[in-house]
Image: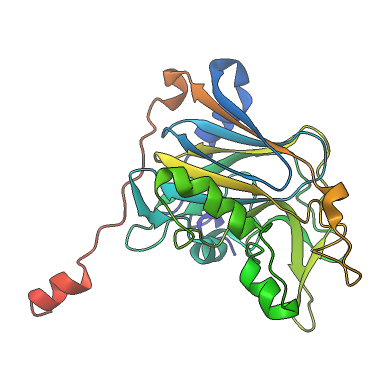
Amino acid sequence: MKLYRNPEAPGRLDFDRDRYRRIAVETSRRHKIHEHIVPPRDGYAWAVPAGSVVRIVAVEGPQVGDLNLWNLHNPRERFWAARTRQLQGAHVTTFDRLWSCLPYLRPMATIIADTLPTEPTANGGRCHDLLGSRCDPYLYKLMDDRDYDVTCHNNLTRAIAPYHLTELDVHDVLNVFQVTGLDPVHEIYFMEPCPARPGDYVEFLAEIDLLCALSTCPSGDLSEWGWGPDGSDPVARCRPLAVEVYALDQELLQGWRSPEPVRIKSVYERSRDGR
């Protein structure tokens, strides 16, 4: 159960969906302030002011993207895939929120529009995955003793370097446009080809000032995952993704404010106070 969606007891995690629905629908009341095409097998990082809308677009068709988020002013606060998975579900879509890590725990972004299918596939797979993580050179080295410089981990690391961050700051991702699931018998993770068509997109409202980073996955649309046993390279299945950022008319944001972190006594404070 998604904790804030119980209609009989919405609780403190609920929020005004009508406001977010208006922001998504009234596109004439926004203007583009930034755009960038992320080439195939590359990465890109960009800053987003709180109260702006970010749209990620599959400009040429199916392509998976690995997304990281940080607090622009404090990179120790970053996207927490595990807690988001608990609060929202293993796959996210419109009105799901992307939560930050401890000791902050607040929505970093709220998804307001998603053109991808939300119904499960025949195998039970769904889109926009939080079950898996990014591809990385360490796993490839472990599996087949080959060095790969073209992975999402590498792409994200290179993308954030201008912001004085390193691979230690790269974290578990939201796999945008990626369809995954768990085998119901053995709970084995599976992936299916990306269903995105040219022009499909997902967009979210930045709840705080964000640093975002996106990798166009080197496995492309996942119709052939990774490098084949014969050494084949799925480069022909790799496509670019577009990043767009929109500023909103202030009237659309009336009554909205950036969420505060959860405030509790820290372990240090409790120890100091003898509690």
Q: How is the image coloured?
A: rainbow
Q: Where is residue 44 shown, x and y percent of the image?
A: 58, 42
Name above or below for residue 228 compared with residue 196: below
Q: Residue furthest right?
A: 230
Lateral position of residue 93 relative to residue 218, left or right? left
Name above or below for residue 33 compared with residue 150: above
The residue at 52%/56% (across/down) is 8
Q: Quarter-wise, where is residue 255 in the image? A: top left
Q: Where is residue 206 shown, x and y percent of the image?
A: 47, 38
Quadrant in the picture for the N terminus: bottom right
Q: Which residue lies furthest to the left in this view?
A: 273
Q: Quick one: 270 or 62, which is closer to the camera?
A: 62
Q: Where is residue 269 shown, x and y percent of the image?
A: 14, 70
Lateral position of residue 110 relative to residue 197, left or right? left
Q: Residue furthest top?
A: 28
Q: Where is residue 134 shown, x and y percent of the image?
A: 63, 62
Quadrant in the picture for the C terminus: bottom left
Q: Quick one: 37 or 16, which is closer to the camera?
A: 37
Q: Is residue 15 visible?
A: no
